[in-house]
Image (cartoon, helix red, strand yellow):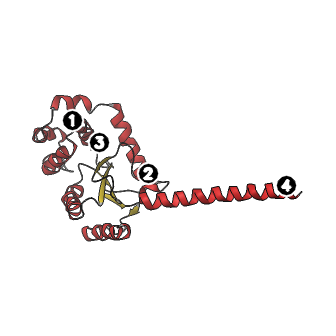
Amino acid sequence: MKKQNIVLFSGVFLILLFVLGVYLYKNQQAKKFGFMAQENASTFVRKHSQTLGSNDAKVYLVEFSDPACETCSRFHPFVKEMMAANPGKIKLVVRYAPFHAGSDYFVKILEAARKQGKYWETLEAMYKSQRYWASHHNPQPHLIWRFLPSAGLNLEKIRNDMNDPEIAKLIKQDLADAKTLNVRKTPGFFVNGKPLQRFGYNQLKELVESEIRANY
């Protein structure tokens, strides 16, 4: 009987020790990886997501954007300034929410440019020329092709690659995640999973800086 009790207690002790070890490991991983250790992190950052910044960054700035969105183009230089002011601490994650009619056309061009290693150059060219092709009253998407050469692209390859079915799947996934996260307009920002409650430059800066203070 005593032997059985010893075996029983030993078994319980080992189970408790195992549970404690798992808890400590997960806690350590959470501290090490922060936001990315959360179970729902994949809703914010997918394997296909375009990113900018250090892989060691502890602050993830997730932006649901639309290349045809005027506000997105205005926030773009502001986001770059924040990253430059905090080198290595912020990782930008671009997600797509092409809410404007036909704007998935420009997302497809962006993703095709990515295959040529010209993603950011193409995004810059799009934002700089946006007023010519993205008018909400009279959109003229075909005009974008006049400005793409400035990004150093092989345009013939872009026209072929933008029809890749995988890009359409990517857009569908991003839109599904945007719906899950209740993103209804662009740009939609999340910092380490926390939504920007009040929209504005200063509000975004405050949220980013609060996460930097909390993680560094």
Q: CA distance from mark 1 to mark 2?
A: 27 Å
Residue picked out by circle 4: 4
Disc 1 to disc 2: CB gap under 8 Å: no
Confirm whether residue 23 shows in the render.
yes
Give the residue drawn at x 23%, y 58%. 71
Mark 2: give few (<14), some (14-19) or many (20+) Cα within 10 Å.
Answer: some
Q: Position of residue 116 (x, y in %)?
A: 21, 35
Disc nearer the start of the sequence (1/2): 2
Determine the secondary structure under disc 4: helix
Name the kind of residue labelled 4 in the image: Gln
* Marked residue nearer the N-terminal end (3 or 4): 4
Please tell me which of labels 3 and 2 falls first in the chain.
Answer: 2
Query: x and y percent of residue 139 in the render?
Result: 19, 45
The quadrant of the image that shows the C terminus is bottom left
> Do the residues under discs 3 and 1 have CB atoms within 8 angstroms?
no
Task: Find disc 2 in the rendering and name its residue.
Answer: 43
Q: Which residue lies under the disc numbered 3?
A: 104
Number of numbered discs visible in the structure rendering: 4
Q: Nearer the viewer, mark 3 or mark 1?
A: 1
Between label 3 and label 4, give the one nearer the viewer. Answer: 4
Instruction: Give the residue pinned by disc 1.
Output: 116
Q: Hey, what amino acid is under mark 2? A: Thr
Circle 1 or circle 2, nearest the eye = 1
Q: State how far apart marks 4 and 1 are (Cα).
A: 68 Å
